[in-house]
Amino acid sequence: MFEQNRSHEFWEWFKSRSNQLFDDPTNADIILDLDRQIQSLGPFDWEIGPFNEEFMYLAISPNLDPKLLAITRLIVKSAPKVKNWVFYDSKPQKPYISQWHMLNDVGKPILIDTSFWKYVLYKFQDGTFDIEVNVVSIDGNEQTRLLAVEIAMANILGEHTFLTLVKNVSVTDSNEFRGIIFKNLYQQLQKDENSTL
């Protein structure tokens, strides 16, 4: 639930530390403090990064939960103007990266490689989609595989677009799967004249 007073307190705190965070975005003490502040708002994720040469961004993320997107929107809508900073209510789209590391269901660090993933889209009349993704060699259970696919889709589409455009995600590891190379997902949706991208 959105708590306006707590949101106001967070933004007041952020304003007081924004210059220091801008100048030293890898400072462990500030990052830990920022994490605590955002966790006090709710079960959210977050990230910071360069927006352009003059600005940084802070994304307060619904943590891949579409039910939390309305709350992060309200939190970001209540943000004041802060010098050299822009704010997002979800994680922004990123350049395609085929490999990264994450923890699986037993806490083991694993490598995710999307180079050979394939997908099939199923489009609905309202312009939204279901997607089936064929993954290769993920060391983890079904929940780990689904989370890896959701992270990859949120990165390639942007979390907001992923949560609003994609209704259901299913994961398979069939050797007989026929589909489109995963890295082409954004381009395919972008070409669709009814897409919201």
Image (tube, rainbow, N blue to C red):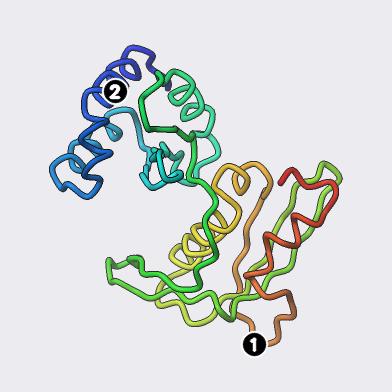
The secondary structure type at the circle numbered 2 is helix
Of the numbered discs 1 and 2, the one sitting upstream in the chain is 2
The secondary structure type at the circle numbered 1 is loop
Which residue is more in the foreground, 181 or 107? 181
Q: Residues within 10 Å of mark 2 (few under 14, many from 20)?
A: some
Three-letter code, disc 1: Asn
What label does residue 185 carry, if any?
none
Q: Residue at x 42, y 39 (%)?
A: 59
Q: Residue at x 22, y 23 (%)?
A: 16
State the residue position of label 2: 10
Find residue 6 and report its horizontal and vertical position in percent: 31, 17
What label does residue 175 carry, if any?
1
Q: Quadrant of the N terminus?
A: top left
Q: Is residue 16 left or right of residue 66?
A: left
Find residue 39 and report its horizontal and vertical position in percent: 28, 35
In this view, the residue farthest toward the bottom is 175
Q: Residue at x 40, y 18 (%)?
A: 80
